[in-house]
Amino acid sequence: MPDTPQTLESLRRQIDEIDDAIHDLIMRRAGVVGDIAATKSSDRVAMRPGREATILRRLAARHEGAFPLPELTRIWRELITGFTRMQGPFAIAVYAPEGHDDLWDLARDHYGSHTPMTPVAAPIQAIRAVHEGTATLAVVPWPVEADGDPWWRILFSDDPRTPRIVGSLPFVVTERHRDEPLALAVAHIEPEPTGDDHAMIAVEVTGDISRSRLKQTFETVGLPPVAFWTRQARTAEDPVIHLVDVADFVAIDDSRLLRLAERLQEDLAPRIRLIGGFATPIAIGRRS
Ligand SMILES: C=C(O[C@@H]1C=C(C(=O)O)C=C[C@H]1O)C(=O)O
C-alpha cells in the first residue's frame, strides 16, 4: 500500500493511542509500587535484585515479534530503577578510575539514566561509601586471580553492617557484552531466591588446601562450585582466603555451610562466611 498522507495519519493516531495506553499503565504501576513501598521498612534499601531478575526473565521468555529484546529489557531496567527511586534515595558509587569507564557504562545501563552515580578510584572506596551510607550500592570489578589485595576481603566480616554482594553486571548479557569485563554490585539488601542463583562463599584457612580438594569438598556437601579465587598469605600468620562462586542459592543458615566447615575442620581450622550472592544473568541475542 502506498504511504498516502491519510494512512500515515491514521497509523500515527494508532501509535498515539498505544502510547497513551502504555503511559496509563506506567502510572497505574506507580500506584501499585506505592502500595508495595508501604510494606517495606523505610530505613532499608527498597531495591530487590532477585525480584527484578524474575521480572526480566519472565518478560524475555514471553517476548515475541519484531521489537528487539535487548531494547525491551533496557526499557524495563529504566522503569524498574524509576520505581525503585520512587521509594527512597538511591545513589551508586562506581569503580571508574581515570580512563576506565567500562563499569560506569554497565552501571548506567542497569541502574538507569538518572540515578546519581559517583566515580571512585578504588573498589574499596565504593564499598566504604555503602558502609558509610553515602551510597546505596557499590559497583566493583569481578574478582581476578592475580589480585594480592582483593576488595572482596573486606566483606569477610562478622559485623552485621557489612554490605554483601547482591548482583552481577551485566544482568542481561547481549552480543556487545562478549568482551566486556563483568562487575559485581555490593549493598545492604537481604537476598531473595529466584530459582537460578549463585552464592559467593569465602573460606579462610590456616593451612594449605589444593584447589582440587577444595572443589571436591564443596561438591561433597552439595555446593556446586563454578569458580575460585585465592588471596595468598603475605606472612606466616596471614591466613589464606579462598573465594568460591557456587551455582546455587545459599542462605546464611544453610546447613551445607555447617557441613563444609565440618569437612574442613580437622586440619584447616576454617572460618567460612557467605559474602553474598546474585541471580544468574540471562544471555539474549538479536533475532535479525
Ligand atoms: C516494586 C518493588 O520495588 C522495586 C521495584 C521493582 C519494580 O519496579 O517492579 C521491583 C523490585 C524492587 O527493586 C518490589 O519490591 O516489588
Image (cartoon, rainbow, N blue to C red):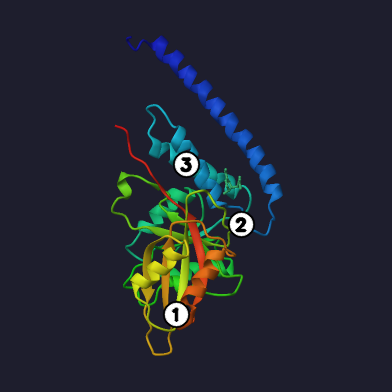
Q: In this view of the protein, which residue sits in the foreground, 160 or 195?
A: 195
Q: Is mark 1 within 8 Å of ligand 1?
A: no
What's the residue type where badge 3 is placed?
Arg
Secondary structure at badge 1 equals strand
Q: Position of residue 41 (x, y in %)?
A: 70, 55
Q: Which residue is mark 3?
A: 57
Nearer the N terminus, badge 2 or badge 3?
Answer: 2
Task: Tell me whether the residue at label 2 lies in contact with that at label 3, contact meaning CB atoms closer than 8 angstroms.
Answer: no
What's the residue type where badge 2 is placed?
Val
Residue 44 sits above or below residue 238 on the image: above
Q: In this view of the protein, which residue sits in the foreground, 127 or 192?
A: 192
Q: Position of residue 197 (x, y in %)?
A: 48, 53
Q: Position of residue 59 (x, y in %)?
A: 48, 36
Secondary structure at badge 2 equals loop
For residue 45, the mark is: 2
Q: Which residue is mark 1?
A: 205
Q: Nearer the viewer, mark 2 or mark 3?
A: 3
| Residue at 51% over, 73% down | 261
- Mark 1 residue crowding within 10 angstroms, few (<14) / some (14–19) / many (20+): many
Q: Is residue 22 left or right of residue 100?
A: right
- Mark 2 residue crowding within 10 angstroms, few (<14) / some (14–19) / many (20+): many
Secondary structure at badge 3 equals helix
